[in-house]
Image (cartoon, rainbow, N blue to C red):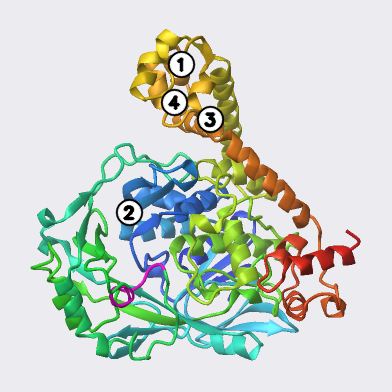
Amino acid sequence: MFPKYDVIVVGAGHAGCEAAVAAANMGSKVLLATMNMNTIAQMSCNPAMGGVAKGQIVREVDALGGYSGIVTDHTMVQFRLLNRSKGPAMWSPRAQSDRMLFAQKWRLMLEAHPNIDFWQEMVSGLVVKNGVVQGVRTGMGLEIEGSAVVLTNGTFLNGIIHIGEKQLGGGRAGEKAAKGITEQLVELGFEAGRMKTGTPPRVDGRTLDYSKMEIQEGDSEPGKFSYTDTPTLKKQMPCHVTYTSPEVHDLLKEGFDRSPMFNGRIRGLGPRYCPSIEDKIDRFSDRDRHQLFVEPEGWDTCEIYVNGFSSSLPEDVQFKALRKVPGFENMKMFRPGYAIEYDFFPPTQLQINLETRLVKNLFFAGQINGTTGYEEAACQGLMAGINSHQAVKEKEPFVLKRSEAYIGVLIDDLVNKGTKEPYRMFTSRAEYRILLRQDNADLRLTPLAHALGMQNMEARMARVEEKNRATAEIEKFIRDYSVAPEALNTYLEEKESATLNQKVKLHSILVRPHIGLAELKEQLPDVQTFLSSFDQEAVELAEINMKYEGYIQREQEMVDKMNRLEEVVLHDSMDYRGINALSAEAREKLATQKPRTIGQASRISGVSPADISVLLIHMGR
């Protein structure tokens, strides 16, 4: 009935979709198994992609040939570049998406791929022989052969939905939980844990009074996520902001005794940086209000997502409290918020390519690894998809360094440090964030994907080469162009910047604080004419390169030093337990996790700088 597949992907959320596409674009024959074909790429929580650090990840996924950025560009209803007032390392794109169109576009793109087949049924177990995965077993007892398997089960593994004192088995509202896989993995020797996440109520936008809220428009010139030729957003939908109040908090507190979070029914740890409304009231009791973002679900629906009001309180408590929020006085609810508790597997059980240590050719990606967020899931799926193909074809793993991508930071953190709570990416987690900007993800990563053999990368590589050429030409022009005092002194006085006494190179003016190329070119017609022939993306990149040249150089020097450690390879056969000069904890951690390089070993929790020195001496370094 089934052919033997190169790669079987279990679960069709954001991680599963990217895993399937990545393996298929590498040339593997892929089966994507899901319990429900109608919920492929479902945005289970908020209908948005990107945000701080997350936007950088989406651009990296796109630069590596993934589809998340393309789908977002085709289906967004609003675009904003966050943190524009800060330095470019902090600029983060975010898009509000049309939930239904997003899932539809993903499904159509997947179905158009000749290397991807589909099977709609719950996968209840794995076929494992002699420590190697051989395929999957379905709920109907079918066995499907696959040379590699990628598990992207999201919140479905033994999922339990909590609404007040009610408990329902399920991986998402209206969908059943997945049974069998956790139990089998534990039998195979894996350690499992429980985590919790939540979602807010959905309400009827026709019953809200937006005049009582603050409006939040998109950017006047909306950007995009994908480096490909996707459409530019022509019209946008506004979001709105409103606030809770002491009265709202008091009403919510009435339900605390029935909250599964406070009475011990939920054992899993929830996300620290996206807490439920009851958690916020409890932890930040000194605050008399909390911000709520009122976000549309799409162009053609009145459904509204109340971002910031995630809750597992009883539905009557949620309803009463929400009706006291400004603009919500006549609100009708579509469905209450709920918490969901699910199984995950501590990611220290993975190798750096996301393959499990215990079972060969078995890969984990997404929330099964303890992460939270579509973007974090998508990038893991992409990397697991690529590496499952590499494993099947007996090729070297594809691993991104911390200095190459936020994706590299995320996977390195998970595998070497593990996580006790849902892991979310922030710019502060990356030590080289000036190098890892959202504007240069294509320059960093597209050549790597092209060299790897990813299909359809020729046009992307040509674009990267053109962007590099244009950027270099712009930089040379600005470094060589001389400007006279009379051309700029009036402008410099207005900017409270030192005036000129003689001709200087334009570059020396551009690097001053609070001086930007957009304003400079308005003062200098020759510069305006020259730059008008270039794409705005290249102009912006050239400006960043010149203004932050010193910082970029310093960070690159740090990377070069760190890369020397990354080049010192540690072999799996090394007997760490026999190196007595190592601390006891280091011997145990190194023997268990078997790092690929000295650099990776240095980031394992419990391995000290002294232990690294011992290793280097042991290796004759």
Judged left or right of residue 560, residue 278 is left
Q: Residue 198, image x and y in percent? A: 35, 75
Q: Is residue 429 left or right of residue 229?
A: right
Q: Amino acid at mark 2?
A: Gln
Give the labeled residue for mark 4.
517
Dots 2 and 1: beta carbons under 8 Å? no
Q: Which mark is residue 166?
A: none
Between marks 2 and 1 in the image, the one whose residue lies nearer the viewer: 1
Q: Which residues are magenta?
A: 273-283
**Residue 144 within the segment the image draws in magenta:** no
Circles 3, 2 touching at the beta carbon (< 8 Å): no
The alpha-carbon separation of the residues under discs 4 and 3 comes to 10 Å
**Disc 3 marks which residue?**
542
Residue behind mark 1? 527
Assign the N terminus to one quadrant of the image.
bottom right
User: Residue, x 44% and y 63% (percent of image)?
Assistant: 374
- In the drawing, does residue 401 fall left or right of residue 588? left
Q: Does residue 16 lie above or below 112 as drawn?
A: below
